[in-house]
């Protein structure tokens, strides 16, 4: 029992960068844009948060700065896809390369440096005493609590507000949205920007809370797993919670199984093999329930020319 | 055209400025250092040529895939599995075979391993409607860990002073090199031959025509009665096989052993994506572009040593180039996405 609580408690921080990134990417894809640059944005968020925290000794300033960096990176993608109507796949890949290069360049001086102020655990009084749930959910750091609130807000706004309907209609049928007078580029810019903020935040979580160190390439595929969880979640924030913590759990198992003498390389494969399996399951579900990706995902919207 | 220049400048200028601000090294010194080390000496030129070989092989295969709008991002993993396939033959299957037979079987085995690695995203795309981008990427990470597992585990040589290396290949499993350079010329000749072959395949054959139709409009191709599934498999096997050949060249031509993944490939499979696009998905154009990027890799090593810049600088430049290419494509209306929707 204690072991299970232990694993679950560790799965939440391990899944938090995934959750933050996935919530953002759900909005991005709901608006019809595919952002394959998540990995690059996350790593830039990680290095920014680490750098600014080191400079200012204030971890919250570091976290805030990572959201700015993330948002800015994402705006490049929005400019490519919405304004230039360039190839979304290529733009995302370029962003990932750019991020991995730039973060290595910036982060060189931080390699091997301890972080001056890391995010500490803050047990929530009262709630933490609930058996099982208490220690698992409420003995975490503040950014985890913020991620709970964000998950709720992302769900609430997507399904219960006018903005949510607008966002979904843009991704589902831009022609209809356009004829209803919705400003499609504005919605898409906003969604991509928000996605960038969330990916930046996810990256920050890795470098100032989860690790907390700077290692070149420390996201190690996290951004790509975010893209997979976005599919697994069927573009629903509430399912993103499940998916993220599931992968968090896999990550925890990866460390817990190491002392048993299994090759660390084999264990490192686990999240990626698991991703493929989970996607296969999700795809079965998608075809059974006849739901799927936002219909215009990855296709740049162009108004029919009336010339 | 004016828009094209504007976009290019909006990318390149801040990019170069960023390198200067972060590293404190003047951009002109960086570029001079890259160009001189890659093209300024006989040694530099031979190294550039050596590093262009895997880029060429991967780039040719990727151009066929991208032409049909199949996003194989997995050349890196396919290359590594090709290296595994060659090592297996050279050390464990027929280590005592005569050179010609041994090398031929190694190349075949590498191509098959690479192709099988690409078969996974192919079959999952067909049977499960899964996006090949994510799957082929996951397969990269799995391949990296698999190679590292082999050299730290079952294939680790007891004779290498504890380094994570496999046993050295027997002499007959080593690809001959040109004089005292590292140019393993049989692989280079193979790459040049395949560039011509794939070019003709794309231009003249029925498959080439089908690739074009699918690339332009997947839905229309379906209505036209094309067997899309078969073509997806064929294209992914082809591009995976070519990347696998690149892996054979690296272990049998350069290292003469299997070693950790990052030692075999500094990201050839990813750089080849840019090579393919900059080469306009034309196998013949990919030859000179590969030389350019081979030079960039040589320069990247050099600025690490001489200027103390991190290796990641080259990734950054690569990213800039890709954005630049995309902006070009935008103004030429070449790399437009209008066609076929991205699947799940």
Image (cartoon, coloured by chain):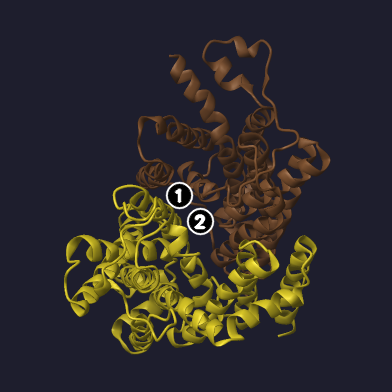
Chain colours: A brown, B yellow
The chain ID associated with circle 1 is: A
Query: Residue B128, image x and y in percent?
Result: 34, 53
Q: Secondary structure at mark 2?
A: loop
Which residue is at 71% across, 56% downward? Answer: A106
Q: Secondary structure at mark 1?
A: loop
Query: Residue B238, image x and y in percent?
Result: 32, 73
Give the labeled residue for mark 1.
A292
Report the number of numbered marks. Answer: 2
Confirm or deny contact between disc 1 and disc 2 (CB under 8 A). Answer: yes
In the image, residue A264 sits, relative to residue B221, either above or below, namely: above
Badge 1 density bin: few <14, some 14–19, many ≥20, Cα 10 Å: some
Badge 2 density bin: few <14, some 14–19, many ≥20, Cα 10 Å: many
Whether residue A181 is visible to the viewer of this picture, yes or no, is no
The chain ID associated with circle 2 is: A
Q: Quadrant of residue A86?
A: bottom right
In the image, residue B18 sits, relative to residue A20, either above or below, namely: below
Residue nearest the viewer, comparing B52 with B167:
B167
């Amino acid at each position: 029992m204690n072991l299970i609580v232990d694993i679950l408690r560790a799965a939440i921080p391990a899944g938090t960068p995934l959750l933050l990134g996935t919530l953002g990417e759900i909005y991005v894809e709901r608006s019809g844009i595919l952002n394959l640059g998540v990995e690059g944005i996350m790593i830039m968020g990680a290095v920014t948060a680490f750098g600014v925290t080191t400079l200012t000794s204030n971890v919250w300033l570091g976290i805030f700065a990572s959201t700015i960096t993330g948002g800015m990176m994402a705006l490049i993608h929005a400019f490519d896809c919405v304004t230039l109507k360039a190839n979304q796949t290529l733009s995302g890949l370029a962003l990932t390369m750019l991020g991995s290069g730039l973060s290595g360049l910036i982060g060189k001086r931080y390699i091997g440096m301890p972080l001056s102020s890391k995010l500490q655990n803050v047990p929530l009084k009262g709630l933490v005493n609930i058996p099982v749930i208490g220690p698992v959910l409420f003995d975490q750091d503040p950014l985890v609590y913020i991620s709970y609130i964000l998950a709720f807000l992302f769900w609430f706004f997507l399904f219960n507000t006018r903005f949510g309907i607008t966002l979904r209609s843009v991704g589902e049928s831009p022609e209809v949205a356009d004829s209803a007078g919705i400003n499609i580029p504005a919605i898409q810019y906003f969604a991509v920007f928000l996605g960038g903020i969330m990916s930046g935040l996810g990256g920050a979580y890795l470098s100032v809370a989860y690790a907390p160190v700077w290692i070149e390439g420390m996201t190690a595929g996290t951004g790509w797993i975010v893209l997979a969880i976005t599919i697994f979640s069927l573009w629903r924030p509430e399912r993103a919670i499940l998916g993220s913590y599931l992968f968090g759990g896999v990550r925890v198992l990866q460390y817990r199984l190491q002392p048993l003498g299994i090759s660390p390389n084999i264990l490192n494969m686990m999240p990626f093999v698991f991703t493929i399996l989970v996607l296969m399951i999700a795809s079965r579900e998608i075809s059974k329930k006849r739901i799927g990706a936002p219909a215009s995902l990855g296709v740049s919207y162009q108004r029919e020319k009336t010339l | 055209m004016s828009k094209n220049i504007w976009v290019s400048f909006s990318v390149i200028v801040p990019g170069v400025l960023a390198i200067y601000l972060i590293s404190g090294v003047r951009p002109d010194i960086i570029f001079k250092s890259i160009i001189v080390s890659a093209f300024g000496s006989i040694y530099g030129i031979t190294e550039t040529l050596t590093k262009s070989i895997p880029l060429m092989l991967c780039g040719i295969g990727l151009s066929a895939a991208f032409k049909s709008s199949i996003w194989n991002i997995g050349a890196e993993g396919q290359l590594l599995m090709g290296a595994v396939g060659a090592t297996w033959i050279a050390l464990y299957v027929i280590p005592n075979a005569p050179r010609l037979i041994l090398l031929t079987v190694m190349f075949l085995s590498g191509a098959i391993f690479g192709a099988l690695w690409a078969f996974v995203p192919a079959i999952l795309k067909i049977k499960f409607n899964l996006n090949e981008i994510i799957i082929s990427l996951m397969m990269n990470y799995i391949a990296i860990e698999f190679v590292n597992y082999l050299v730290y585990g079952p294939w680790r040589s007891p004779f290498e002073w504890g380094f994570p290396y496999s046993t050295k290949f027997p002499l007959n499993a080593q690809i001959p090199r040109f004089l005292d350079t590292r140019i393993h010329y049989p692989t280079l000749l193979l790459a040049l031959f395949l560039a011509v072959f794939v070019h003709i395949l794309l231009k003249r054959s029925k498959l080439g025509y089908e690739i074009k139709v699918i690339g332009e409009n997947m839905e229309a191709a379906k209505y036209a009665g094309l067997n899309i599934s078969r073509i997806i498999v064929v294209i992914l096997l082809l591009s995976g096989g070519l990347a696998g050949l690149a892996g054979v060249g690296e272990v049998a031509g350069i290292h003469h052993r299997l070693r950790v993944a990052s030692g075999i490939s500094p990201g050839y499979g990813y750089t080849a994506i840019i090579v393919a696009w900059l080469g306009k998905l034309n196998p013949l154009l990919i030859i000179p572009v590969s030389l350019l990027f081979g030079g960039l890799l040589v320069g990247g090593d050099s600025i690490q040593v001489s200027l103390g810049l991190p290796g990641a600088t080259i990734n950054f430049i690569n990213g800039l180039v890709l954005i630049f290419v995309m902006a070009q494509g935008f103004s030429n209306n070449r790399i437009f996405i209008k066609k076929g929707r991205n699947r799940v």
